[in-house]
Image (spheres, helix red, strand yellow):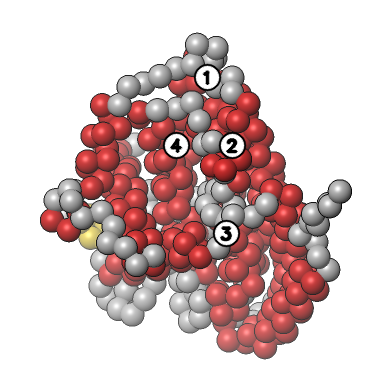
Amino acid sequence: MEPALIWEWVIKSLVIIFIMLTGFAYLTFYERKALARIQARIGPNRAGPGGWLQPLADGLKLIFKEELIPAEAEKVTFILAPIITVLPALIITAVLPWGGTVTIFGRQVSLTLANLDVGILYIMAVASIAVYGIVLAGWSSNNKYAMLGGLRASAQMIAYELALGMAFAAPILLSGSMNLNEIVNGQRGLWYVVLQPMGFFIFLIATLAEVNRAPFDMPEAEQELTAGYHTEYSGMKFALFFMAEYIKMIAVSAFAATLFLGGYRGPGVDTYPWLGPLYLFLKVFILLFWMIWVRATLPRFRYDRLMAFGWKVLFPVALANVLFTAVVVVLMPQASGWALLPPLLVVNILVIVLLLVLLSAGLGGKRNVA
């Protein structure tokens, strides 16, 4: 193996880690500012000009906070749990195509760290690992609130991972590949969000539940579980859980943009390849604002309704969407782009009707009144 190729992998890995860690730090600032604007407040504005040093101040505060480990905790597992949670959030971005191929110092460099032919399988496998860290954090804390939070996280992941897998299937069927670069190139003439708006909707809802964002943040519901699975954590161990959540927000937004919004593709990308990462950043920025807006707008679901929605509404809708899309692809094997729009429009209408029927059937769970 060429030493230059090894150095290329090392440098790209370090750049991706830097981007994700910096993105995590300033996503917290962006969220606080956006929530403040939505709630007619000012937001953080003391640390540095306009509050731009607030992430640094928060990081220093957490570094110097006292680290406490409960006396009855399983200490080794208690320490490992935050690491097990944050590592998948970082390594999942290895298959993300940040751009096409660019020339650096006369060398052709791909802006994808690992261009896997089974990239989507890699995403689903790695994303599923993070829940082990959450469950282990709840169990090792020897705290009933933390344990309940861990159990909720595992149940929620199982319920919504199935719908997420079905949402992944739509771009695979349309592009005929699980390689993320090929999926992006398949959207040259038309983004898949136009052909599969319901697939995009299902993906967004399922990813909200996967990253435990409001209104699906039941594993850490403060009113019921104090702080959920990280009740007993403090200092940098708590910061690692915090980091994992926000890095996963960036990652799922980037994957949503890649699968449905054309990824790094945009006007002039073929002529100026460095525009690709800028287009991807813009799309990710918009999707992150959507997540923040949802948190500011919607109340938290009751737990039974959350589980019922995942199993009885979202999964059947996602399954129907995949089945109808597969029928269209099989019946029109040579069609692509705009030629698929009329039949897939019918598919999306049928899926919307099914969604409305399931919602009107009251499958969100009913309150039992004694």
- Which circle's residue, 3 or 4, is located before the other in the chain? 4
Q: Is residue 133 visible?
A: no
Residue 143's place in the image compared with 312, above or below, is: above
Q: CA gap, disc 1 to disc 3?
A: 33 Å
The residue tagged 1 is: 77
Residue type at tag 1: Thr
Residue occupying image coordinates x 72% and y 82%: 349
Where residue 325 appears, as percent x and y from the top left, is 71, 72
How far, Cα to Cα, is label 1 from label 2?
Answer: 21 Å
Q: Amino acid at mark 2?
A: Leu
Which of discs 3 and 4 lies nearer the camera? The answer is 3
| Labels 3 & 2 near each other (Cβ < 8 A) | no
The label nearer to you, 1 versus 2, is: 2
| Residue ID for mark 4 | 241
- For residue 225, the mark is 2
Tell me the element at label 4.
helix
Which residue has dot 3 on it? 299
Answer few, some or many: residues within 10 Å of disc 2's Cα (few below 14, many 20 plus, some between 14 and 19): some
Query: Label 4 crowding class (10 Å Cα cut-off): few <14, some 14-19, many 20+?
Result: many
Q: Is 314 situated left or right of 339 in this image?
A: right
Q: Earlier in the sequence, mark 1 or mark 4?
A: 1
Q: Is residue 365 left or right of residue 263?
A: right
Judging depth in this view, the residue of 273 and 349 nearest the camera is: 349
| Residue 66 picture location, percent across and down | 32, 22
Find residue 11 and report its horizontal and vertical position in percent.
26, 42
Mark 3: which amino acid? Pro
Q: Amino acid at mark 4?
A: Phe
